[in-house]
Amino acid sequence: MKYTIRKHMKTSLRNFAPFAVKVTIIAGIVGSEACCNNAPTMMTTTAEILDGKALANRLREELRKEAAELIQKHGRAPGLAVILVGDDPASHVYVRNKKSGCEKMGFSSFSFELPANTSQQHLLGLITELNQDPKVDGILVQLPVPAHINSETILEAIDPGKDVDGFHPYNIGRLIARKPALRSCTPYGCMKLLEETGLDLHGMESVIVGASNIVGRPMAMELLLAGATVTVCHRFTRNLQAHIERADIVVAAAGKQGLIQGEWIKPGAIVIDVGIHRRANGTLTGDVAFDSASKRAGWITPVPGGVGPMTITMLLANTVQAFKTHVGD
Ligand code: GUN
């Protein structure tokens, strides 16, 4: 019975996404739970998991096939240069994963691990060389960089056509102007996850929590491009709960463990959790209180296994896109 109701609910949501709450309550009234406790309120449900790992594997397999054909056709592999400055342990893990993702795809990977005292001038010199290197299609400088280096200067020095992170003002500007070129990887990955729901995002109330250059701001532009109504919440937002309570889509990218309480989630909403935090017991968790949120949401990303695997996948997709532009495919 529950399964039937959920299917009905999802079908209804597909057609009438902005009325998600209404549809959920109707489903609750007719559901088996409602008939037993006589409570015509929201049904207790379990959200559908948006499995980023499975989606990432699927997309990487498609990309791998496409790359193999391109390599055959053009006689060289897409090349990604990854630059890491300093000893940040988390950055080392991210960079290792990016390099390994790249190699599994059959791409050429160029790795530069520079000491923490590397000068800005030296780093700019390396970027100039890589900008001119025809074997390199993508350049990525892992953030954060040490404090004596100005990250904006560095990101702006990368050739926008090789900016596979999608952080260069040119690429951000293209997204704002509704002509995306290379798109920021995490928001791009979040859009792919949203696509998995099968819902039409036009007119949906979306609330992004966090206004960073890497996630929040480009995410706002992605959702606007997809026709959603967009609110960006940040550290000065007065009543976060009120914004979350009316959201059909929540994108949590505040970097604060458990900031979004499950009880705030609108029944049937889509919840995308970009946060990643390590608990004292070593397990990972996000910005959203998953257990309680998954009882109300229609769809939710897990941590780990949600947004994380999608970020690197979109980096690989951007590298293929940059390669195709460079070879004129
Ligand atoms: N640091 C945290 N996330 C990212 C990312 O997506 N790209 C880069 N270059 N640095 C990061």
Image (spheres, grey):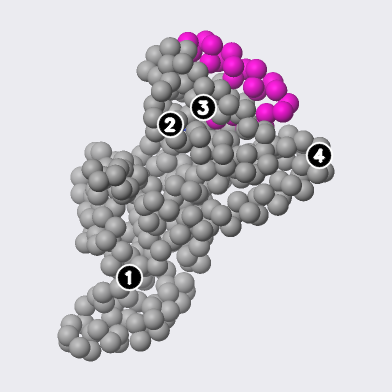
On-image quarter of the C terminus: top right
Q: Which residue is drawn at 55% across and 46% down?
A: 313
Say whether residue 64 is left or right of residue 176. right
Return the residue at label 1. Answer: 46
Q: Is residue 132 magenta?
A: yes
Disc 2 to disc 3: CB gap under 8 Å: no
Q: Mark 4 or mark 3, which is nearer the start of the sequence? A: 4
Asked if disc 4 and disc 2 are in contact, CB closer than 8 Å, the reply is no
Q: Which of marks 4 and 2 is nearer the N terminus?
A: 4
Q: Where is residue 11 in the image (x, y as percent from the top left)?
A: 45, 77
Check whether the beta carbons of the residues at disc 2 and disc 1 lie within 8 A of each other: no
Estimate how packed mark 4 is, as few (under 14), some (14 to 19) or many (20 or more) residues with alpha carbons within 10 Å: few
Which type of secondary structure does the marked residue at label 2 adopt? Answer: helix
Quarter residue 105 falls in: top right
Q: Which amino acid does label 3 sit on?
A: Val
What's the distance in space between the residues labelled 4 and 1, CA to CA?
48 Å
Q: Which of marks 2 and 1 is in front?
A: 2
Determine the CA span between mark 1 and mark 3: 40 Å
The residue type indicated by label 2 comes to: Ser
The residue indicated by pointer 3 is: 141
Q: Which of marks 4 and 2 is in front?
A: 2
- Residue where numbered disc 4 is placed: 74
- The residue at the point 47 percent across, 10 percent down is 119
Mark 3 or mark 2, which is nearer the start of the sequence?
Answer: 2
Q: Residue 91 carries which label?
A: 2
Q: Callout 1, which amino acid?
A: Thr
Question: In the rendering, at what x and y percent does residue 81 appear?
Answer: 60, 28
Magenta part of the protein: which range?
Answer: 119-141
**Label 2 CB sits under 8 Å from any ligand 1 atom:** yes
